[in-house]
Amino acid sequence: VDYLKQRMKDLSTRTNSDKSNLIRFTDLEANEGYNESDPANGGVTYTMGMTSFHAVKSNGEILHGVPVFVEAYDIVDQGWIWEVTKWPIVGTLASWGYDMFAKIRTQLTRGSSVESLIEDHYTRRNEIMMKNDDGVEEVCESCQNKIASEKNEGR
């Protein structure tokens, strides 16, 4: 992601065109929190985002996995790198490889499984909601229902 951000900045400087509006990167673990209900996030839940790289295009289309890389590198004029993934057999293998990597990436980079990070996220979120229920701040019933249903659905 850092490479893509730098590449966009470099291209914008060289070509006098702002490419920053073509792709937006969202930090799922930002201090201010990830807002799953923000329309700009396309309904991508924390769980969805943690289990696979996602992108929401300006037309609302949601991409995940290898197509995100194809789109992102195309925006920074390096789409040719991922062009080979459009071939049926190569695309299938690339998607399979990415899916396998996505399952273990946080174990390699952070020492925790994706599942445990997701569980920790929802536990923290529920603790906040319980504190709010104790009088710090009222939490609407529909918000509580949404959290409960997401947890039950494994999101």
Image (tube, rainbow, N blue to C red):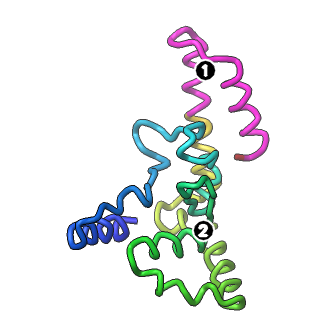
- Left or right position of 14 against 146: left
Residue at image location 60% in from the left, 68% down from the top? 102
Residue at image location 57% in from the left, 50% down from the top? 117
Residue 18 in percent (x, y) is at: 30, 61
- Left or right position of 136 against 91: left
- Left or right position of 32 against 104: left
Q: Nearer the viewer, residue 46 or 88?
A: 88
In magenta stretch: residue 51: no
The part of the image, by quadrant, that contains residue 49 is: bottom right
Residue 34 in percent (x, y) is at: 50, 41
Q: Is residue 131 above or below residue 53?
A: above
Which residue corresponds to mark 2?
102
Residue at image location 71% in from the left, 91% down from the top? 89
Which residue corresponds to mark 1?
130
Residue 27 in percent (x, y) is at: 45, 50
Between tags 1 and 2, which lies in front?
A: 2
Disc 2 is placed on an element classified as helix
Read off the magenta span: 125-154
Residue at image location 53% in from the left, 63% down from the top? 106
Tell me which secondary structure the magenta stretch mostly adopts: helix
Q: Residues within 10 Å of mark 2 (few under 14, many from 20)?
A: some
If you read the primary sequence from the N terminus, does the residue marked by circle 1 or circle 2 appear first?
Answer: 2
In magenta stretch: residue 139: yes
Q: Nearer the viewer, residue 9 or 138?
A: 9
Residue 10 in percent (x, y) is at: 25, 70
**Amino acid on which disc 1 is placed:** Met
Disc 1 is placed on an element classified as helix
**Amino acid on which disc 2 is placed:** Ala
